Amino acid sequence: MRRTLALAAAFTILPATAAAGADLGDLLDRSREASYSAEQVINCSTPDGVRDAVVSLEQIGGELLVSGEVEVSSGAGGWALVRDGALVDSASVEAGSSDADLTYRVDDGAAHPFLDREAGLYRLYAGDVLRGELIVDSETGALLSVVTYNSDGDVYCERRFIEFDPTPPEASAGTLAATETLESTGGSALPERLGTFERLDLYEDDEGFVFAYYSDGFFSFAVFQTPTVVELTDPGALRLEARVYARSFAPGQVTYSWETRDGGLALVGDLPPDMHPEVLEGLAQPYAPGILGRIWKNLFG
C-alpha cells in the first residue's frame, strides 16, 4: 500500500550553519541562540502561484516552536513532522563537518531599524548573484526578516516578523519531551553532494526509511528514501526532458515526490526554484512501470 502523507506543509526545513562562511555562520548561530516570541508573515512567488501564510513562533534554548497554517520558519538545522495540526515527531539535525569551499559571502551589515528596534541589514551573495537579505536584531541576534532571491534577481520568498517580543517564552515540557536528537547512520546510495549542496547527515530507521540532510551553508533540503511512494495532495508537476516529478509548493518550502525502481523518493527544502533541476538530476530518476506493473500495483498496492 502506498504511503499517503501531505508533505507539502509537513516538514520544517531550517538553514544549517556548518558549511557557511565565518560571518554567515556567526549570524545564523546567534539567531539560533536567541529567545523570543513573534508573529511571522511568509510570502513566496512560486512557478505555481503565490503561497503565503502567517505563523506564530517561540524560540528558547535552541528549540523553535511553530504554529499557524503551515510549519515553516528560519533558524538552525532541524525538521518536524506535523499531521492534522499535532506534532508527531521532530528532531534536531546536528550538521556534520564540511570541507566544501565557502559558497556565500556576506557584505558588512548596515544599520537598518526594523519594528522600532536597532537592526542590521546583511546581503548574501553567491559570486555576484544576490541570494538573500537578512535583517538581524542587534540586541538578540534574531532574524527579523529574511528575503531570498532567484538567480535572475526576482524575489522568491520573504519571511518577516510583524510582531516581536524578546522576552524568553516559557518552555513547554510536553513539547520539549517530543523532540529527540537523531543519530547518524552509515552509508547510503544517496549522493554525498548534489550540485553545491553537501550531505551533512544521514539517518535510517528499522523500516527502511532513510533521511538525508543537505545544505550549501544557507539553503537546505532533506531527501527521504521510502519503501513505497509518498503521495502529495493536489500536486503540480515539473518536467525535465522525459522525467516528471510531482511538485507542491507551500509558504517557504517546496516538496517533490517520485517513484524509483527501488521505491520512492521525496525532497523537501527551502531552495529557490532555479536550483531545483541540478539537485533533482543528481538523484535516482523517476521510474514509470510498464502496463503489467501498473496492473499489479492497482490490484495489490
Image (cartoon, rainbow, N blue to C red):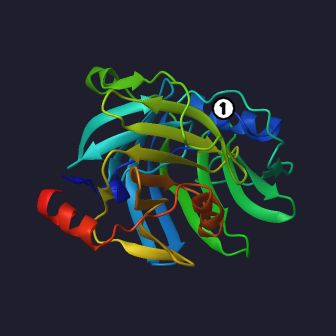
Q: Is residue 92 left or right of residue 232?
A: right
Is residue 243 at all visible to an observer of this figure?
Answer: yes
Depth check: give the residue in front, 277 or 136. 277
Q: Is residue 290 left or right of residue 21?
A: left
Q: Residue furthest front?
A: 292
Q: Residue drawn 42% across and 43% down?
A: 57
Question: Number of labelled discs?
Answer: 1
Depth check: give the residue in front, 177 or 274. 274
Category of crowding for the residue at label 1, using alpha-carbon neighbours closer than 10 angstroms: few (below 14), some (14–19), many (at least 20): some
Please say if 69 is above or below 106.
Answer: below
Q: Position of residue 52 (x, y in %)?
A: 42, 67
Q: Position of residue 43 (x, y in %)?
A: 49, 67
Q: Position of residue 270 (x, y in %)?
A: 55, 55
Task: Report which quarter residue 255 is drawn in.
Answer: bottom left
Task: Report which quarter residue 282 is drawn in.
Answer: bottom right
Depth check: give the residue in front, 88 or 183. 183
The disc labelled 1 sits on which kind of residue? Arg
Is residue 167 at all visible to an observer of this figure?
Answer: no
Q: Residue drawn 75% across and 40% down?
A: 20
Depth check: give the residue in front, 17 or 1. 1
Q: Position of residue 17 (x, y in %)?
A: 67, 36
- In the picture, the quarter occupied by the C terminus is bottom left
- Location of mark 1 (residue): 30
Q: Residue drawn 77% across and 54% down?
A: 124
Element on which disc 1 rests: helix
